[in-house]
Amino acid sequence: MKRRITQEDNFTYLLGSLIFLLFSGAYSAQFSSGFMEEFLIEVTILSMMIGLWSVRFTGSIFKIGISLIVIAVMSHFVISFVDKTEFEIIQLIFLLLFCFILLKPASEQALFSEDITGNNIMGSICIFLLLGFIWAIFYLLIIEVTPISFSGIELTTWKQNLPDVMYFSFVTLTTLGYGDVLPISPLARFLVYMEAIVGVFYMAIVVSSLVSAKGSSKE
C-alpha cells in the first residue's frame, strides 16, 4: 500500500533524511575513501529528493526543485569524468539554491502554524538543520574560491571537506565555538558571525512562535 504524506507527518521524513545526511558525512570522514565520497554525494541527492517529496510546494516551485535535482545529478556525472573546479562551484551553487527553495515552505508550515503539533516541532528542527547546511555550503564556496579562508580545514575537494565544514557550521550556529577550526579571511569571518547571529535569533523566533501558537489555541 502506498504511503501518503500529510501535514501531520511530512517533516518526519525530512528530519530523518537530514540526520542521515549528517551521519553519512561523519561516517565518510571516519572511513575516508573514494567510495565514501560517492556515497555522500548520493545521500545528498537522496535528501534533496526526500525534501522535495515531503515539503508541500506550489506548482512552479516544485518544477524548479525537480530541475535543480536533475542538474545536481547531471553535474555529478560530469564531475566524475571532468576534474574542473568550475563544475564543483556550479554544483555547490545549485545545492545552495535548492536549500533556499526548501527553506521557505518549510518555515511557513512549521513556524507560522496556528497549532502546536509534534510535526511542527520536527519542522522547526528541520529548519535549524537546513540553516546549518546552507552555511556549510557558503563555507565550501569560499574555500573553493579562496582555499586559505579557514585554518584547520585541509585543501582538498569539497566532498572531502563537507563533514568538517558541516561540523564547523553547527558549532558556529549553536555558538559553541570550540576553536579547532578558525576563519581567516574577512569574508569567512563575516559569514561566521552572521551565522551565529542567525542561530541566536532563530531560537528566539521558534520560542515566540510556539508561545503565540499556544496562546491562540487556548483562546
Image (tube, rainbow, N blue to C red):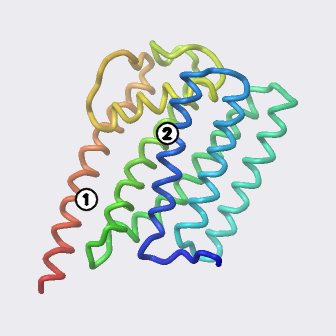
For marks 2 and 1, give the CA distance: 22 Å
Q: Picture coordinates of residue 15 (x, y %)?
A: 45, 55
* Residue 22 numbered tag: 2
Q: Picture coordinates of residue 33 (x, y %)?
A: 68, 21
- Which SS class for mark 1? helix
- Quadrant where the N terminus lies? bottom right
Q: Would you call the spot at circle 1 few (<14 residues within 10 Å), some (14-19), or many (20 or more)?
A: some
9 to the left or right of 56: left
198 to the left or right of 153: left
Name the residue nearer the viewer: 192 or 44: 44
Q: Would you call the spot at circle 2 few (<14 residues within 10 Å), some (14-19), or many (20 or more)?
A: many
Q: Picture coordinates of residue 195 (x, y %)?
A: 35, 38
**Marks 2 and 1, the one that precedes in the sequence:** 2
Number of numbered discs visible in the structure rendering: 2
The answer to which quarter of the image holds residue 207 is: bottom left
Instruction: Residue under label 1, please give it.
Output: 206
The answer to which quarter of the image holds residue 40 is: top right
Q: Are marks 2 and 1 in contact (CB under 8 Å)?
A: no
Q: Residue furthest right?
A: 81
Residue at 76% x, 34% y is 87
Residue 158 vertical placement versus 8 (above, below):
above
Residue at 30% x, 72% y is 117
Q: Picture coordinates of residue 210 (x, y %)?
A: 21, 66
Amino acid at pointer 1: Val
- Quadrant where the C terminus lies? bottom left
Residue at 45% x, 27% y is 187
Residue 119 vertical placement versus 168 (above, below):
below
Amino acid at pointer 2: Leu
Residue at 47% x, 33% y is 166
- Which SS class for mark 2? helix
154 to the left or right of 42: left
Looking at the image, is mark 2 or mark 1 nearer the viewer? 2
